[in-house]
Image (tube, coloured by chain):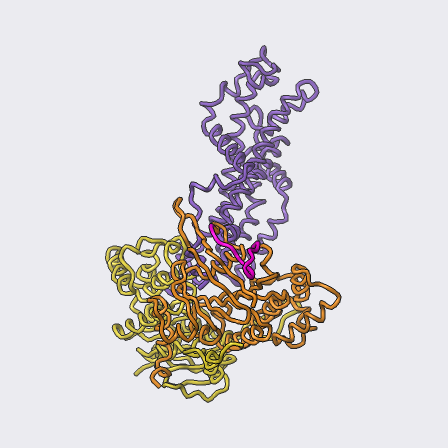
Chain colours: A orange, B yellow, C purple
Amino acid sequence: MPTLTIDDLGITTQRHGRDIALVDGLTLTLETGRILALVGPSGSGKSLTASGAQGVLPAGVSRRTGRVLLDGVEQRPSLIRGRTIATIMQNPRSAFNPVKTMRAHALETLTAVGHRDAGSEDTIRDTMAEVGLDDPARVLGLHPFEMSGGMLQRMMIALALLTRAPFLFADEPTTDIDLVVQARLLDLIERVARERHLGVLLITHDMGVVARLADDVHVMSAGRIVERGSVRAIFDAPAHPVTQSLIAAHLALYVDEEAA
Amino acid sequence: MTPLIEARGLGRSYRTFSLMGSAAPKVVLDGIDLTIRPGETLGLLGRSGCGKSTLGRLILGLEKPDRGDIRFRGTALGALDSAGLAAFRRAVQVVFQDSLEAVNPRHNVERIIAEPLRHLTDLNQEQRAARVRELLLEVGLTADDATKLPVQMSGGQLQRVCIARALAPQPELIVLDEAVSNLDLVLQIQTIDLFKQIQEARGTAFLFVTHDLRLVHRFCERVVVMDGGRIVEDVPVTRPLHFTHPAARALQGAVLPARPTRRHEQPTV
Amino acid sequence: MAAIADHEGSAVASPRGFFSNMRMSARIACALVAILLITAVAAPLVAPYDPNAVDLPGRLQGPSLAHWLGTDHLGRDMLSRLIYGSRVSLGAVAIALTGIIALGIAIGGTSAVLGGRADQFIMRCCDVFLTFPTIVLALFMVGMLGTGLVNVIIAIVLSHWAWYARIVRGLVLSFKRRDFVLAARVAGASRTRIFIEHLLPPTFAQLVVLATLDIGHIMLHVSGLSFLGLGVMAPTAEWGVMINDARQFVWTEPMLLFWPGFALFVAVAAFNLAGDAIRDKLDPHLAAEHQH
């Protein structure tokens, strides 16, 4: 079974001339066909882990240690981005070029990963149908401003699937969108992950999303993974105080179900 | 009991323009009737674009309705004299979603919290400084935070500064416009617990604008559900909630599970 | 939540790093600007001679140890005249820009704060002023009021303020819809208070950046109009006047023409490059890109 390993990732920033560790000695392994949730409080380093593994860190932050291994073989970050790992982000609108149509985005994605050929248009339409975008012919001619946030989310997932990358990073894919759209989107991510046998790294702070989607959970705090376990184990017997507080805060929202 | 805020037949539409020419006005609010009584916690629930934030802004007096009116203790907002308007401003405050966007980045915490005190109260500078210290402690910050700038604080801390600013003129109603949506879940719970404490200590009414039904359960006594610019449900919060309108039921059905679902017990193939 | 994490992780640019992070060309430009400002302010201390001291026997000399850049047709020291000339140029630019910014903020700000018909009316007036080229307006002013630096500065202000008024209006309107201004309204602040406390400071910061980009261009106007004999009059040491004086010796003493022209070129280029660099540093959008 193909695996993607992030090994000994260390990310630091400079403040007042000193190095501050934002991610420290982090190791995790994704398997295709499984969804791994990386959870933790704000500023615990979950998003940096994803961007650090792909070599796309923000300015002022740098990777000090760490390798990315595909089936045990070290890879250059620039080569795995898009080819081995596809990404969906929190804000779909910022992920699209406002002056380009969906067709241009799709073709650009295919060109970037070297999958562009005579059948590209059909591939694109099939993928769009797969993510629930009806009438692909019309949608392909649209610009981002002509589409709703929900449609853009689906298009972003379609672009991720077009890369045929075996691994998917989803960074807060549903934060701050309304619950009905969120539910549909989570259904979609689950369905394409199962059907395409993807290995998913799901970054979130919402344990409800974890309960809905994840197979395994890693809990981060202050740049380190403090607890690993199956989703059942994490919910039923959280061991680390950070995990316990996350679970307690989450379950506090469901008092009635718990009592019942 | 006189209602604190009473909206009657509110309507609001925006004209939209596009490159293709002007489109028909988009109706954002349509025939809204809503009453907020002193001391109650009212949830305003709906999907994005349902008009709930616009309703919040009308109640704050930041926008004017096209039709209908909003009454503050029985007087329409448009008919308030300057003393009445000052009383309305003292009585109705707001906490926005994005705390970093909601404060002047050039002002320190003390100045931010003291702003309503300067404009809406007679306190002198020393009294204002003392009041800011009290408020900081009340929202769980320290007196030392008074001299910090917004960029020196975390999102959760800065949202507490915004809450302190809203509390400063001792309002009777605070509009929470998605006020916890940008925080992580642990901070959301802590912030809502803070609102509860405030409500118990001061009897402040809250209008809690949100898309998250789970938070309504935790905080509100009554919930109003909006869909397409109209109010489609207005019910007391019970466990479980009794919604009848399809839009409200869809929101209910979208709530995420509390615990991992049965699927996970099956062995992976 | 990502926004919070980003915000916590963002490093605020320290003043110490302000210059060290610039490109070399920008650093040289900033250094040149600093030298220009210092020599202009300290001209009496720096200049070796009185710029207007005529020495007819020593006229049209080449460079020497006594006169580093030689002397002009009246025997005046070129270097001293260049140094004093920077005073006139920079002083005129400073006064003109102050006037432009003040008018821009007053009129553009009023327009944005009032809104509605008043806004429409003020913007149409701006459009009228935008159509006047500086040179035409200057000729008109000089025709009406006579030649002189003051009239040239008035002409520059009148032909430039409308750009700034439009920019101020746009900036104020964009800030006006932001949550921190709405929060100030809920806090009971009056329109005037909101303008002074919340809208003016960020607008002014952006304007100053824009203004640095206009320094070179306005400096050219001052010298250009003086060259045409509309502004500063001989014998005052001013670069445009010096170029005009040197015209008659262009074939025999070309260096007399070269030095003031070169000074103008270097000053304009330095201010433009420094303005670019400062804009890159202070522009919130570009700064945000640096941080992410």
Considering every residue shown, the one lying at the far top of the view is: C57
Asked if residue B263 lies in the magenta stretch, the reply is: no
Question: Residue C15 appears in which quarter of the rendering?
Answer: top left
- Report the front residue among A91 and C37: A91
Q: Residue furthest right?
A: A118
Residue A38 makes an appearance in the image:
yes
**Image height check: is A197 above or below C82?**
below
Left or right: where B65 falls relative to C226:
left
- Which residue is at 48% across, 69% downward? A36
Answer yes or no: is residue B96 visible.
no
Position of residue A157 measured from the top left corner of the image (x, y, whole percent)? 59, 69
Q: Relative to residue A240, is residue A133 drawn left or right? A: right
Q: Nearer the viewer, residue B76 or A203?
A: A203
Q: Quadrant of the N terminus of chain C?
A: bottom left
**Magenta segment:** A64-77
**Image location (x, y in percent) of residue A149:** 56, 70
What percent of the width, then of the height, locates residue B254? 48, 80
Q: Main secondary structure of the magenta part?
A: strand
- Between C58 and B163, which is closer to the camera in this rendering? B163
Residue A71 highlighted magenta (yes or no): yes
Location of residue B254 with respect to C94 vertically, above or below: below
* Residue at left offset 47%, top offset 66%: A203
Q: Residue at x 60, y 37 (%)?
A: C221
